[in-house]
Image: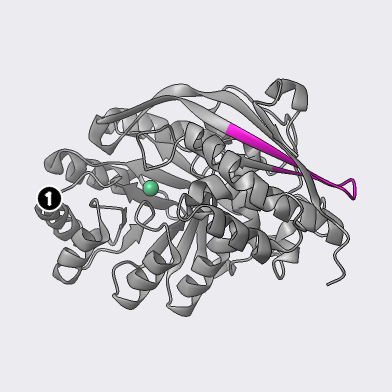
Protein backbone atom coordinates (compact mmCIF):
# COMPACT_ATOMS: atom_id res chain seq x y z
CA UNK A 1 0.00 0.00 0.00
CA UNK A 2 1.41 3.34 -0.99
CA UNK A 3 1.18 4.92 2.42
CA UNK A 4 0.57 8.62 2.25
CA UNK A 5 -1.14 9.23 5.54
CA UNK A 6 0.40 9.29 8.98
CA UNK A 7 -0.83 9.85 12.51
CA UNK A 8 0.61 13.24 13.38
CA UNK A 9 -0.87 14.14 16.76
CA UNK A 10 -3.01 12.53 19.47
CA UNK A 11 -5.09 14.72 21.77
CA UNK A 12 -6.55 13.25 24.95
CA UNK A 13 -9.49 14.85 26.77
CA UNK A 14 -11.19 13.96 30.03
CA UNK A 15 -14.75 14.82 30.99
CA UNK A 16 -17.17 13.55 33.65
CA UNK A 17 -20.51 12.26 32.39
CA UNK A 18 -23.05 12.31 35.24
CA UNK A 19 -25.83 9.72 35.24
CA UNK A 20 -29.38 11.06 35.42
CA UNK A 21 -30.21 8.65 38.23
CA UNK A 22 -27.87 6.85 40.65
CA UNK A 23 -27.51 3.31 39.43
CA UNK A 24 -27.00 0.03 41.27
CA UNK A 25 -25.72 -3.25 39.93
CA UNK A 26 -25.21 -6.71 41.24
CA UNK A 27 -27.91 -6.78 43.89
CA UNK A 28 -27.02 -3.28 45.08
CA UNK A 29 -23.37 -3.92 45.94
CA UNK A 30 -22.11 -1.57 43.19
CA UNK A 31 -23.31 2.03 42.95
CA UNK A 32 -22.59 4.45 40.08
CA UNK A 33 -23.31 8.18 39.73
CA UNK A 34 -20.78 9.53 37.23
CA UNK A 35 -18.70 8.09 34.38
CA UNK A 36 -15.10 9.16 33.74
CA UNK A 37 -14.92 9.61 29.96
CA UNK A 38 -11.78 9.88 27.83
CA UNK A 39 -12.03 11.32 24.32
CA UNK A 40 -9.23 10.96 21.81
CA UNK A 41 -8.69 13.10 18.73
CA UNK A 42 -6.22 11.77 16.19
CA UNK A 43 -4.85 14.19 13.58
CA UNK A 44 -3.22 12.98 10.39
CA UNK A 45 -0.76 14.71 8.12
CA UNK A 46 -3.43 14.45 5.38
CA UNK A 47 -5.79 16.73 7.30
CA UNK A 48 -8.29 14.06 8.35
CA UNK A 49 -9.28 13.95 12.01
CA UNK A 50 -10.71 10.93 13.83
CA UNK A 51 -12.46 10.70 17.20
CA UNK A 52 -12.50 7.90 19.73
CA UNK A 53 -13.99 7.47 23.19
CA UNK A 54 -13.27 5.23 26.13
CA UNK A 55 -15.76 5.40 28.98
CA UNK A 56 -15.69 2.49 31.41
CA UNK A 57 -18.72 1.98 33.62
CA UNK A 58 -17.06 3.61 36.62
CA UNK A 59 -14.02 1.86 38.09
CA UNK A 60 -15.66 -0.90 40.14
CA UNK A 61 -17.65 -2.69 37.40
CA UNK A 62 -14.81 -4.51 35.62
CA UNK A 63 -11.00 -4.11 35.55
CA UNK A 64 -11.10 -0.85 33.57
CA UNK A 65 -10.94 2.80 34.66
CA UNK A 66 -10.58 6.19 33.05
CA UNK A 67 -7.14 6.90 34.45
CA UNK A 68 -6.01 3.55 33.07
CA UNK A 69 -7.06 4.56 29.56
CA UNK A 70 -5.11 7.81 29.76
CA UNK A 71 -2.02 6.08 31.18
CA UNK A 72 -2.27 3.39 28.51
CA UNK A 73 -2.41 5.96 25.72
CA UNK A 74 0.64 7.72 27.17
CA UNK A 75 2.54 4.42 26.99
CA UNK A 76 1.31 3.50 23.49
CA UNK A 77 1.46 6.91 21.82
CA UNK A 78 5.13 6.74 20.72
CA UNK A 79 4.38 3.42 19.00
CA UNK A 80 1.30 4.74 17.17
CA UNK A 81 2.57 8.11 15.95
CA UNK A 82 3.68 7.90 12.33
CA UNK A 83 1.53 4.86 11.48
CA UNK A 84 -1.12 4.94 8.78
CA UNK A 85 -4.45 4.96 10.66
CA UNK A 86 -6.16 3.17 7.78
CA UNK A 87 -3.95 0.14 8.44
CA UNK A 88 -5.99 -0.97 11.42
CA UNK A 89 -4.16 -4.26 11.90
CA UNK A 90 -0.80 -2.48 12.00
CA UNK A 91 -2.08 -0.07 14.61
CA UNK A 92 -3.54 -2.98 16.57
CA UNK A 93 -0.24 -4.88 16.53
CA UNK A 94 1.72 -1.80 17.53
CA UNK A 95 -0.57 -1.30 20.52
CA UNK A 96 -0.42 -4.98 21.51
CA UNK A 97 3.36 -4.91 21.28
CA UNK A 98 3.70 -1.67 23.23
CA UNK A 99 1.29 -2.73 25.97
CA UNK A 100 0.11 -6.36 26.26
CA UNK A 101 -3.43 -6.66 27.62
CA UNK A 102 -5.14 -3.44 28.75
CA UNK A 103 -7.59 -3.91 25.90
CA UNK A 104 -10.02 -1.23 27.07
CA UNK A 105 -7.25 1.40 26.82
CA UNK A 106 -6.77 0.53 23.14
CA UNK A 107 -10.41 0.88 22.12
CA UNK A 108 -10.50 4.70 21.73
CA UNK A 109 -7.41 4.62 19.50
CA UNK A 110 -8.91 1.85 17.37
CA UNK A 111 -12.18 3.80 17.13
CA UNK A 112 -10.46 7.02 16.02
CA UNK A 113 -8.49 5.11 13.37
CA UNK A 114 -11.69 3.49 12.04
CA UNK A 115 -13.23 6.98 11.93
CA UNK A 116 -10.32 8.20 9.79
CA UNK A 117 -10.31 5.09 7.59
CA UNK A 118 -14.02 5.54 6.92
CA UNK A 119 -13.60 9.20 6.02
CA UNK A 120 -10.66 8.34 3.74
CA UNK A 121 -12.79 5.73 1.96
CA UNK A 122 -15.89 7.97 2.05
CA UNK A 123 -17.84 5.18 3.72
CA UNK A 124 -19.56 4.76 7.09
CA UNK A 125 -17.42 2.47 9.28
CA UNK A 126 -19.90 -0.41 9.04
CA UNK A 127 -19.77 -0.31 5.24
CA UNK A 128 -15.99 -0.22 5.34
CA UNK A 129 -16.12 -3.29 7.63
CA UNK A 130 -17.79 -5.18 4.82
CA UNK A 131 -21.32 -3.94 4.49
CA UNK A 132 -23.92 -2.46 6.77
CA UNK A 133 -27.54 -3.40 7.28
CA UNK A 134 -29.76 -0.36 7.75
CA UNK A 135 -32.28 -2.14 9.95
CA UNK A 136 -32.82 0.11 12.97
CA UNK A 137 -31.52 -1.71 16.04
CA UNK A 138 -33.57 -1.81 19.24
CA UNK A 139 -31.82 -0.06 22.13
CA UNK A 140 -31.65 -2.09 25.31
CA UNK A 141 -32.56 -0.04 28.36
CA UNK A 142 -30.96 -0.52 31.73
CA UNK A 143 -33.27 -1.28 34.60
CA UNK A 144 -31.23 -1.06 37.80
CA UNK A 145 -31.44 -3.50 40.70
CA UNK A 146 -34.76 -2.56 42.30
CA UNK A 147 -37.98 -3.82 43.85
CA UNK A 148 -40.76 -5.38 41.76
CA UNK A 149 -42.75 -2.12 41.80
CA UNK A 150 -39.75 0.03 40.84
CA UNK A 151 -38.80 -2.42 38.10
CA UNK A 152 -42.25 -2.13 36.56
CA UNK A 153 -42.10 1.67 36.76
CA UNK A 154 -38.68 1.91 35.08
CA UNK A 155 -39.65 -0.50 32.29
CA UNK A 156 -42.79 1.55 31.71
CA UNK A 157 -40.72 4.77 31.57
CA UNK A 158 -38.55 3.27 28.84
CA UNK A 159 -41.58 1.90 26.99
CA UNK A 160 -42.84 5.50 26.80
CA UNK A 161 -39.62 6.34 24.90
CA UNK A 162 -40.21 3.46 22.49
CA UNK A 163 -37.87 0.88 23.98
CA UNK A 164 -38.70 -2.77 23.26
CA UNK A 165 -35.47 -4.20 24.72
CA UNK A 166 -34.53 -4.12 28.38
CA UNK A 167 -31.59 -5.27 30.44
CA UNK A 168 -33.08 -5.91 33.86
CA UNK A 169 -30.44 -5.98 36.56
CA UNK A 170 -30.88 -8.78 39.06
CA UNK A 171 -28.47 -10.64 41.34
CA UNK A 172 -28.24 -10.80 45.08
CA UNK A 173 -31.13 -12.51 46.79
CA UNK A 174 -32.22 -15.67 44.99
CA UNK A 175 -35.88 -15.65 46.03
CA UNK A 176 -36.23 -11.97 45.19
CA UNK A 177 -34.56 -12.52 41.80
CA UNK A 178 -36.90 -15.36 40.90
CA UNK A 179 -39.88 -13.23 41.93
CA UNK A 180 -38.69 -10.27 39.84
CA UNK A 181 -38.13 -12.43 36.77
CA UNK A 182 -41.59 -13.98 37.09
CA UNK A 183 -43.17 -10.56 37.56
CA UNK A 184 -41.43 -8.96 34.56
CA UNK A 185 -42.36 -11.97 32.42
CA UNK A 186 -45.98 -11.55 33.49
CA UNK A 187 -46.08 -7.97 32.12
CA UNK A 188 -43.83 -8.56 29.14
CA UNK A 189 -45.13 -7.50 25.72
CA UNK A 190 -44.92 -10.16 22.98
CA UNK A 191 -42.32 -8.20 20.97
CA UNK A 192 -40.08 -7.32 23.92
CA UNK A 193 -36.52 -8.55 24.23
CA UNK A 194 -35.57 -8.92 27.88
CA UNK A 195 -32.20 -9.84 29.28
CA UNK A 196 -31.85 -10.54 32.99
CA UNK A 197 -28.39 -9.37 33.97
CA UNK A 198 -26.82 -10.75 37.13
CA UNK A 199 -23.50 -8.93 36.71
CA UNK A 200 -21.62 -11.90 38.24
CA UNK A 201 -23.18 -11.70 41.67
CA UNK A 202 -24.45 -15.27 42.16
CA UNK A 203 -22.42 -18.16 43.51
CA UNK A 204 -22.64 -21.42 41.60
CA UNK A 205 -25.39 -22.87 43.78
CA UNK A 206 -27.38 -19.62 43.72
CA UNK A 207 -27.09 -19.51 39.94
CA UNK A 208 -28.23 -23.09 39.65
CA UNK A 209 -31.27 -22.44 41.84
CA UNK A 210 -32.47 -19.55 39.67
CA UNK A 211 -31.48 -21.01 36.30
CA UNK A 212 -33.44 -24.18 37.11
CA UNK A 213 -36.40 -22.35 38.70
CA UNK A 214 -37.04 -20.22 35.59
CA UNK A 215 -36.34 -22.95 33.01
CA UNK A 216 -39.91 -23.10 31.71
CA UNK A 217 -39.89 -19.32 31.03
CA UNK A 218 -37.04 -19.61 28.51
CA UNK A 219 -35.53 -16.29 29.59
CA UNK A 220 -31.98 -15.09 28.87
CA UNK A 221 -29.74 -14.72 31.93
CA UNK A 222 -26.57 -12.67 31.57
CA UNK A 223 -23.32 -13.27 33.40
CA UNK A 224 -24.79 -15.32 36.27
CA UNK A 225 -21.47 -15.88 38.04
CA UNK A 226 -18.01 -14.38 38.34
CA UNK A 227 -15.93 -16.53 35.99
CA UNK A 228 -16.19 -18.78 32.96
CA UNK A 229 -15.10 -21.64 35.22
CA UNK A 230 -18.22 -21.01 37.32
CA UNK A 231 -20.43 -20.92 34.24
CA UNK A 232 -18.79 -24.11 32.97
CA UNK A 233 -19.31 -25.89 36.28
CA UNK A 234 -23.10 -25.58 36.05
CA UNK A 235 -23.55 -25.49 32.28
CA UNK A 236 -24.89 -29.05 32.03
CA UNK A 237 -27.22 -28.77 35.01
CA UNK A 238 -29.85 -26.37 33.68
CA UNK A 239 -31.61 -25.51 30.41
CA UNK A 240 -31.77 -21.69 30.64
CA UNK A 241 -30.04 -19.66 27.88
CA UNK A 242 -26.98 -17.83 29.19
CA UNK A 243 -25.29 -14.67 27.91
CA UNK A 244 -21.73 -13.67 28.75
CA UNK A 245 -20.37 -10.14 28.68
CA UNK A 246 -18.02 -9.37 31.57
CA UNK A 247 -16.28 -12.71 30.89
CA UNK A 248 -15.98 -11.98 27.18
CA UNK A 249 -12.81 -9.92 26.96
CA UNK A 250 -10.32 -11.72 24.75
CA UNK A 251 -10.67 -13.69 21.55
CA UNK A 252 -9.60 -16.73 23.56
CA UNK A 253 -12.61 -16.17 25.85
CA UNK A 254 -14.89 -16.15 22.82
CA UNK A 255 -13.37 -19.36 21.47
CA UNK A 256 -13.72 -21.09 24.82
CA UNK A 257 -17.35 -20.03 25.31
CA UNK A 258 -18.22 -21.21 21.81
CA UNK A 259 -16.36 -24.51 21.77
CA UNK A 260 -17.17 -25.51 25.37
CA UNK A 261 -20.87 -24.61 24.95
CA UNK A 262 -20.86 -22.17 27.87
CA UNK A 263 -23.37 -19.65 26.51
CA UNK A 264 -25.95 -19.11 23.78
CA UNK A 265 -25.50 -15.34 23.63
CA UNK A 266 -22.53 -12.98 23.47
CA UNK A 267 -22.74 -9.46 24.92
CA UNK A 268 -19.95 -7.85 22.89
CA UNK A 269 -18.63 -4.57 24.26
CA UNK A 270 -16.34 -2.96 21.67
CA UNK A 271 -14.83 -0.58 24.20
CA UNK A 272 -14.10 -3.40 26.62
CA UNK A 273 -12.56 -5.88 24.17
CA UNK A 274 -10.16 -3.43 22.50
CA UNK A 275 -12.25 -1.80 19.79
CA UNK A 276 -14.06 -2.73 16.61
CA UNK A 277 -11.07 -4.57 15.14
CA UNK A 278 -11.07 -7.16 17.92
CA UNK A 279 -14.85 -7.12 18.44
CA UNK A 280 -15.43 -8.06 14.79
CA UNK A 281 -13.57 -11.34 15.35
CA UNK A 282 -15.85 -12.18 18.27
CA UNK A 283 -18.82 -11.49 15.99
CA UNK A 284 -17.47 -14.01 13.50
CA UNK A 285 -16.91 -16.66 16.16
CA UNK A 286 -20.47 -16.12 17.36
CA UNK A 287 -21.91 -16.41 13.85
CA UNK A 288 -19.90 -19.56 13.18
CA UNK A 289 -21.32 -21.21 16.31
CA UNK A 290 -24.97 -20.19 16.25
CA UNK A 291 -24.50 -17.69 19.07
CA UNK A 292 -26.72 -14.60 19.05
CA UNK A 293 -25.43 -11.19 20.06
CA UNK A 294 -26.12 -8.03 21.95
CA UNK A 295 -23.68 -5.23 21.13
CA UNK A 296 -23.10 -3.02 24.16
CA UNK A 297 -21.46 0.35 24.49
CA UNK A 298 -20.57 -0.31 28.16
CA UNK A 299 -21.01 3.39 28.86
CA UNK A 300 -20.23 6.79 27.49
CA UNK A 301 -21.59 9.33 25.07
CA UNK A 302 -23.30 9.00 21.71
CA UNK A 303 -19.86 8.35 20.21
CA UNK A 304 -19.65 5.03 22.08
CA UNK A 305 -23.26 4.23 21.18
CA UNK A 306 -22.55 4.93 17.51
CA UNK A 307 -19.45 2.74 17.55
CA UNK A 308 -21.54 -0.12 18.95
CA UNK A 309 -24.17 0.42 16.26
CA UNK A 310 -21.58 0.20 13.49
CA UNK A 311 -20.63 -3.29 14.69
CA UNK A 312 -24.29 -4.26 15.14
CA UNK A 313 -25.00 -3.15 11.56
CA UNK A 314 -22.56 -5.81 10.31
CA UNK A 315 -24.46 -8.60 12.11
CA UNK A 316 -27.38 -10.29 10.32
CA UNK A 317 -30.71 -9.07 11.71
CA UNK A 318 -31.68 -12.51 13.01
CA UNK A 319 -28.50 -12.79 15.08
CA UNK A 320 -28.47 -9.26 16.56
CA UNK A 321 -30.84 -8.95 19.49
CA UNK A 322 -30.29 -5.30 20.49
CA UNK A 323 -27.73 -2.58 21.12
CA UNK A 324 -27.18 -1.37 24.64
CA UNK A 325 -26.68 2.40 24.60
CA UNK A 326 -26.09 4.92 27.35
CA UNK A 327 -27.27 8.20 25.80
CA UNK A 328 -30.62 8.32 27.60
CA UNK A 329 -28.95 7.84 30.99
CA UNK A 330 -26.63 10.88 30.94
CA UNK A 331 -27.19 14.54 31.82
CA UNK A 332 -24.43 15.82 29.48
CA UNK A 333 -24.52 15.49 25.70
CA UNK A 334 -21.19 16.22 23.98
CA UNK A 335 -22.61 16.00 20.43
CA UNK A 336 -26.14 17.41 20.57
CA UNK A 337 -28.31 16.03 17.79
CA UNK A 338 -25.53 14.10 16.08
CA UNK A 339 -24.70 10.42 15.77
CA UNK A 340 -26.93 7.39 16.30
CA UNK A 341 -29.87 8.71 18.30
CA UNK A 342 -32.84 7.12 19.98
CA UNK A 343 -35.81 7.28 17.64
CA UNK A 344 -38.73 5.31 19.04
CA UNK A 345 -36.38 3.07 20.97
CA UNK A 346 -34.16 2.28 18.00
CA UNK A 347 -30.77 3.47 16.71
CA UNK A 348 -30.35 4.39 13.04
CA UNK A 349 -26.97 4.24 11.35
CA UNK A 350 -25.52 7.65 10.45
CA UNK A 351 -24.81 7.96 6.73
CA UNK A 352 -21.78 10.24 7.14
CA UNK A 353 -18.39 8.77 6.31
CA UNK A 354 -16.42 7.35 9.23
CA UNK A 355 -17.95 7.17 12.70
CA UNK A 356 -20.52 9.80 11.75
CA UNK A 357 -20.30 11.84 14.94
CA UNK A 358 -17.74 14.03 16.66
CA UNK A 359 -17.98 15.85 19.99
CA UNK A 360 -18.20 19.62 20.48
CA UNK A 361 -14.61 20.38 21.33
CA UNK A 362 -15.41 23.35 23.54
CA UNK A 363 -17.39 21.02 25.83
CA UNK A 364 -14.27 18.92 26.36
CA UNK A 365 -12.07 21.76 27.61
CA UNK A 366 -8.32 21.72 27.17
CA UNK A 367 -6.69 18.37 26.35
CA UNK A 368 -5.12 16.65 29.36
CA UNK A 369 -2.36 15.36 27.08
CA UNK A 370 -1.11 15.90 23.54
CA UNK A 371 1.35 13.52 21.86
CA UNK A 372 3.13 14.43 18.64
MG1 LIG B 1 -24.26 -7.21 31.37
Note whether residue 136 is visible.
Answer: no
The percent position of residue 94, horizontal first and vertical second, equals 62, 59
Foreground residue, 101 or 50?
A: 101
Instruction: Say whether residue 13 is left or right of residue 167.
Output: right
| Figure disc tally | 1
The percent position of residue 203, horizontal first and vertical second, equals 14, 49
Q: What stretch is highlighted in magenta?
A: 38-51
**Residue located at (87% from left, 48% from top):** 45
**Residue located at (63% from left, 65% from top):** 314
Q: How is the image coloured?
A: one colour
The percent position of residue 317, horizontal first and vertical second, equals 58, 66
The percent position of residue 323, horizontal first and vertical second, equals 53, 51
**Residue located at (57% from left, 65% from top):** 280
Residue 259 drawn above or below residue 278: below
Q: In which quarter of the image is residue 39?
A: top right
Quadrant into which the C terminus falls: top right
Crowding at mark 1 (Cα within 10 Å: few <14, some 14-19, many 20+):
some
**Residue located at (67% from left, 38% from top):** 40
Q: Which element carries disc 1, helix, strand or loop?
A: helix
Instruction: Say whether residue 89 is left or right of residue 238.
Output: right
Q: Which residue carries the number 1 mark?
A: 206
Residue 168 drawn above or below residue 37: below
Q: Quadrant of residue 219?
A: bottom left
Whether ligand 1 has any atom under 8 Å from the Cβ at mark 1 is answered as no
Foreground residue, 274 or 27?
A: 274
Quadrant into which the N terminus falls: bottom right
Note whether residue 192 is visible.
Answer: yes
By secondary structure, the bulk of the magenta-drawn segment is best described as: strand
Amino acid sequence: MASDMKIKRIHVYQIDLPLEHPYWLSGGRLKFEVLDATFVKIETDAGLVGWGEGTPWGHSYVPAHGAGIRAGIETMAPFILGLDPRQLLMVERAMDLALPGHLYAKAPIDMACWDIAGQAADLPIADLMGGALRTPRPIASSVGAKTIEETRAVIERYRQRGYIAHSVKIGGDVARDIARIRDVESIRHPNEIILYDVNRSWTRQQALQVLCAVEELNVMIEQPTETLDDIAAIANKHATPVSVDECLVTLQDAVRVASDNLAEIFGIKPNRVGGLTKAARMRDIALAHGIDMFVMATGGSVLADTEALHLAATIPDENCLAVWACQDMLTIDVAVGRGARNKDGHLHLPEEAGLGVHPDEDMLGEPVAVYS
